[in-house]
Every structure is written in structure tokens, then in C-alpha cells.
């Protein structure tokens, strides 16, 4: 099994307001007064940076949604909802929770099938990276974790890296070095708990958590 824990850079801060409003109207058919409520919520937000008691000029924000708010997480999930279609297209199971994404691909442990799974996951991640670039988001490759897991009495698949636009994401050693937990969805979770959320089901099944 390949488990990829996808991380973004400053995810909530880079949500583009015009793109978000377009998604709300075109993908979720939110129009009229309801759309204007969201436009009003995003408008007239300003930011000041203070360093050593010195303040910068106040600037209006044209991107970003408030972190720590229910609506901020909800809007981010709506903004990134097309990623679900990308992962379904590549037959990769997934969970989404705000800016945390778990991607899972299961296969029999053999060299040929491992290589096929690697190609499928690389194609999916490259597609995701392209979508993020087009929508002004950025994948954090340094914090993205690749885990290759095997069942009891089965050999570990011979897979060590996946490539994304000429950069490599190396396999984490956590599963093989005795560390049986990983940081994801905002807390430390056991591998077994993560795997339990991916029951045997058709490859286009997915769960959204908010």
C-alpha cells in the first residue's frame, strides 16, 4: 500500500478570492444574495505586520481565508473540491480534512505491480501539482510524507521514491524504524487508525471530513 500525506505551503493564506467566488458560483451554484454574503465576508480585510514595535503599511488582502474559524475551513474545502475529481480520475482513494489530504493506493506486493502503482501515484500527484499551480496553491514537498506499508507476513513493496516535476519525495522510514504513528489531520495518529479509514471498496470511493 502507498499512503501519501500531502502538505501545502501557507494553504489558507493563498486562497485566491476571485477564484473562490468563481468556484462557489460555477461548481456549487451559489448565486445572488448568498454569493454576495461570501463576497462581503472576504472583502475589506486588511493586514499589518509588526516587527520590533515597527508596523508596516496597512494593506488590503485579496487572498486568504481566516484560520481557526469554521467558515474558513469550509471555504478552503470548497476551494479545493476539484482535487477530488483529480484523484478519482486516477483511481486513488483519499480523505480530505481542511488543508490535510491523505491519498491511498493499494496493490499486491510484487515488483511489476509496485512499479504500476508508483506510475499511477506519480501521475496523480503531478496532476494535483498542476491544478494547485493553476489555482495559486503550492504543494510543500519537504513536508509531504510518502509511506509504503505492507500487511502481516507480506514483503515490503520495493518502492522508495515518487517523482513530481523532476523532484523526488522519498519514502518515510517511520513504518520500518518502529515509529507506528504519523502527524496528520492536525494530530498524531497510529498507522492502523489511518488504514482502518480506507476499507475495501471501489477505487472511486472517498470521504470528506470537516
Image (cartoon, helix red, strand yellow):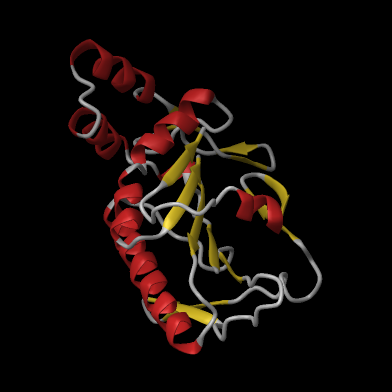
Q: Quadrant of residue 149?
A: bottom right
Residue located 34% across and 42% down the image = 81
Give coordinates of residue 130: x percent, y percent.
30, 63
Residue located 53% across and 63% down the image = 4
Q: Quadrant of residue 51?
A: top right
Above or below: residue 182 compared with residue 51: below
What is the count of numbered marks? 0
Residue located 58% across and 47% down the image = 197
- Residue 176 horizontal side relative to residue 89, left or right: right
Give coordinates of residue 20: x percent, y percent.
30, 35
- Residue 182 horizontal side relative to residue 166, left or right: right
- Residue 170 horizontal side relative to residue 152, left or right: left
Give coordinates of residue 143: x percent, y percent.
59, 63
Residue 60 visible to an observer of this rendering: no
Give the quadrant of the N terminus.
bottom right
Query: Which of 143 and 17 lies nearest the eye of the viewer?
Result: 143
Query: Which of 195 and 40 lies nearest the eye of the viewer?
Result: 195
Residue 75 visible to an observer of this rendering: yes
- Farthest-out residue, top: 33
Query: Which of 178 and 47 lies nearest the eye of the viewer?
Result: 178
Give coordinates of residue 19: x percent, y percent.
26, 39
Above or below: residue 24 compared with residue 38: below
Residue located 51% across and 85% down the image = 110
- Farthest-out residue, right: 178
Query: Which of 160 and 186 lies nearest the eye of the viewer?
Result: 160
Amino acid at each position: 500500500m502507498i499512503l501519501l500525506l500531502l502538505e501545502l505551503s501557507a494553504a489558507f493564506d493563498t486562497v485566491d478570492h476571485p477564484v473562490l467566488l468563481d468556484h462557489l458560483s460555477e461548481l456549487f451554484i451559489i448565486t445572488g444574495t448568498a454569493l454576495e454574503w461570501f463576497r462581503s465576508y472576504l472583502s475589506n480585510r486588511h493586514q499589518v505586520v509588526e516587527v520590533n514595535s515597527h508596523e508596516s503599511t496597512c494593506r488590503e488582502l485579496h487572498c486568504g481565508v481566516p484560520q481557526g474559524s469554521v467558515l474558513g475551513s469550509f471555504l478552503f474545502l470548497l476551494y479545493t473540491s476539484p482535487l477530488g475529481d483529480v484523484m478519482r480520475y486516477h483511481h486513488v482513494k483519499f480523505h480530505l480534512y481542511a488543508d490535510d489530504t491523505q491519498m491511498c493506493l493499494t496493490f499486491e506486493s510484487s515488483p511489476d505491480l509496485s512499479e504500476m502503482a508508483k506510475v499511477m501515484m506519480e501521475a496523480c500527484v503531478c496532476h494535483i501539482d498542476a491544478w494547485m499551480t493553476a489555482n495559486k496553491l503550492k504543494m510543500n514537498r519537504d513536508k509531504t510524507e510518502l509511506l509504503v506499508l505492507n500487511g502481516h507476513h507480506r514483503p515490503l513493496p520495493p518502492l522508495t521514491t515518487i517523482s513530481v516535476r523532476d523532484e523526488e519525495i522519498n519514502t518515510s522510514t517511520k513504518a520500518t524504524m518502529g515509529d507506528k504513528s504519523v502527524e496528520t489531520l492536525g494530530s498524531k495518529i497510529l498507522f492502523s487508525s489511518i488504514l482502518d479509514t480506507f476499507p475495501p471498496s471501489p477505487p472511486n470511493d472517498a470521504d470528506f471530513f470537516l
